[in-house]
Amino acid sequence: MESVPLNYSLRQLRYFVVTAEVLSFTAAAKLLYISQPSISAALADLESSFGVQLFIRHHAHGLSLTQTGRDLLSKARELLKSAEDFQAAAKELDTGLTGTISLGCMISLAALLIPGLISRFLATHSGISFRIHEANQQDVLRDLRSGLLDMALTYDLHLADDIQFVPLLDLPPYAILPKAHRLAARKTVSLEDLSGEPYVMLDLPHSREYFSSLFDVLGVRPVPSFKSSQPEVVKGMVANGLGFSILNFPQRVAKSVDGQEFVIKRFRNKLRAMTFGVGYSEGIKPRKVVQSFASFCAESIGHFRYMGARSNSPHPRHVSR
């Protein structure tokens, strides 16, 4: 349905209501602390916009309302009251811990992080609700820019200057192998050990490039035998003996959803870690409730400091990749 453009302002309605109550341009101007010509011109413009006459102007005897003016006066008061209520609600959302947080999260981290973080936060902040959006990095950044998301828990991959990023945790890559793999008994593995082995790729935008690029030091990237955009499917394929994979998000249990086990191995190679943190749109000031939840996330980082994860100082930065 096409919206109808408004040809009046709340300021003009306020002038109309005050003038209707005192039936004098001079008295209304004093109450509103503006000049009489200004209020007279504003009301003339309002009448022109509506195409109706609101006042009968009696020279030297003030004003009286037309029937149309009387009919519209109560509606104008209702509209001004609604506008005041709207402003009060907006101010409460910005200054108080109420409202809805639209939270994005990298899909590979959502199951691990979101349930616990929200549960612990709501235990002491009952007036807040959440809208959750799990997506790949590309979609998370798009939705931050559009304003669909208030904040996102994600990685420092392909961030531009319009994204503010607060780093919280460095997550180095590691290999996962079938339990019966020939390298399963080793304490660590190297990229050279895995070269030529069947590779199961986590097929998410930006993530797949990051994991594949780790092999650039060898001069050849692995060709995936299998691909999936779902982390649980990747882990299931590895656990069922279809190849190795490389991940970086923490694992609490080395077991796939079908009950098959895999093993986790650190790399001997010095490899670049991905940094996990909180992202915001540069052009949108986070509401206080959003800031509060982001601070809570930073404080709760100890709940998933394992598998080589390293704490990062929570200072905002802009990162371009």
Image (cartoon, rainbow, N blue to C red):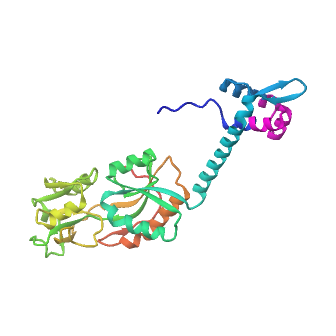
Q: Is residue 210 left or right of residue 92?
A: left
Compared to 59, does 125 lie above or below? below
Residues in magenta? 16-39
Q: Is residue 216 above or below residue 249?
A: above
Residue 210 versus residue 28 in the image, above or below: below
Q: Residue at x 56, y 30 (%)?
A: 5
Residue sitting at 84 percent across and 38 percent down?
30
Query: Which picture quadrant has residue 317?
Result: bottom left
Magenta stretch: residue 38 in it? yes
Question: Which residue is rendered at x = 83% and y = 34% of the image?
Answer: 23
User: In screen coordinates, is 191 left or right of 293?
Assistant: left
By secondary structure, the bulk of the magenta-drawn segment is best described as helix
Q: Nearer the viewer, residue 103 or 270?
A: 103
Whether the magenta-drawn stretch holds residue 99 is answered as: no
Whether residue 321 is visible here, answered yes or no, is no
Res 234 quadrant in image: bottom left
8 vs 33, nearest the viewer: 8
Q: Nearer the viewer, residue 96 or 298?
A: 96
